[in-house]
Image (cartoon, rainbow, N blue to C red):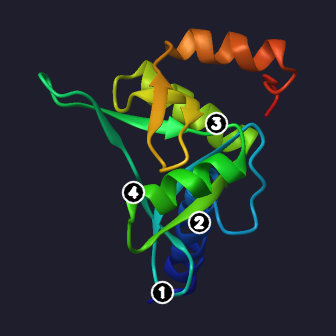
Amino acid sequence: MSILSDYQWHLTAENVKSVLENILPGPEVKGDPFWAVMEVERNGLTTGVYHTIVQDSQNGKEVLPLYERKDDAEKALQGAKLNDMAVRGISRSHMRVLVEFQKKGFIHLGVCAFVSDNGNIGVICPSAEHIRQMLEEMGRWHDEI
């Protein structure tokens, strides 16, 4: 490989790393504004797979539940008895990506309304615009992120 090719490879690797860091929260990320349950590898890094629930059994619509409190996400994780999963924080920059994915129809986001003692959850499914409005009202959405 020539030096130019090595340099181009380095730039590509850095770009991919930057994109992944914006999409995949690591264990150190604080949930601001939400928390989610994600699949993790043995080393604790996320695989990119978010835990989803079936919201509508007739059409099989899967929803990615978002939790305002880490404790609620942990209770839901324990109740679901999921192996290889962990609670991860969703930062504002992660949230922007997820909202854009919902706008494009790639995912459906749900906001957890309650978690029962046994880990069952109730989820509301607002539109991407309603999620954005809610976060703006809470002071947790900024266009410059």
Say which residue appears at 38% left-offset and 73% top-offset.
Answer: 83
* Amino acid type, mark 1: Arg
- Which residue is tagged 4? 80
Q: Quadrant of residue 41?
A: bottom left
- Mark yes or no: residue 23 visible: no
The secondary structure type at the circle numbered 2 is: helix
Question: Which label lies toward us, 3 or 1?
Answer: 1
Q: Residue at x 53, y 40 (%)?
A: 116
Quadrant (top left/top right/bottom left/bottom right) for the N terminus: bottom left
Report how far apart the C-alphas of labels 1 and 4 lie in the structure.
19 Å
Identify residue for label 1: 42
Query: Mark 4 or 3 closer to N-term?
Result: 4
Mark 2 or mark 4: name the one nearer the start of the chain.
2
Q: Indicate which label's residue lies in the foreground, 2 or 4.
A: 4
Q: Please tell me the numbered disc located at residue 95.
A: 3
Question: Label 1's element?
Answer: loop
Where does the image place residue 52, in percent across and percent down from the top left?
37, 44
Q: Residues within 10 Å of mark 1 (few under 14, many from 20)?
A: few
Name the amino acid, label 3.
Answer: Met
Please name whichever residue, 96 or 8, is drawn nearer the observer in this view of the structure.
Answer: 96
Mark 1 vs mark 4: which is more N-terminal?
Answer: 1
Considering every residue shown, the one lying at the far right of the view is 139
Q: Amino acid at mark 4?
A: Ala
Pointer 1 and pointer 4: residues touching (CB < 8 Å)?
Answer: no
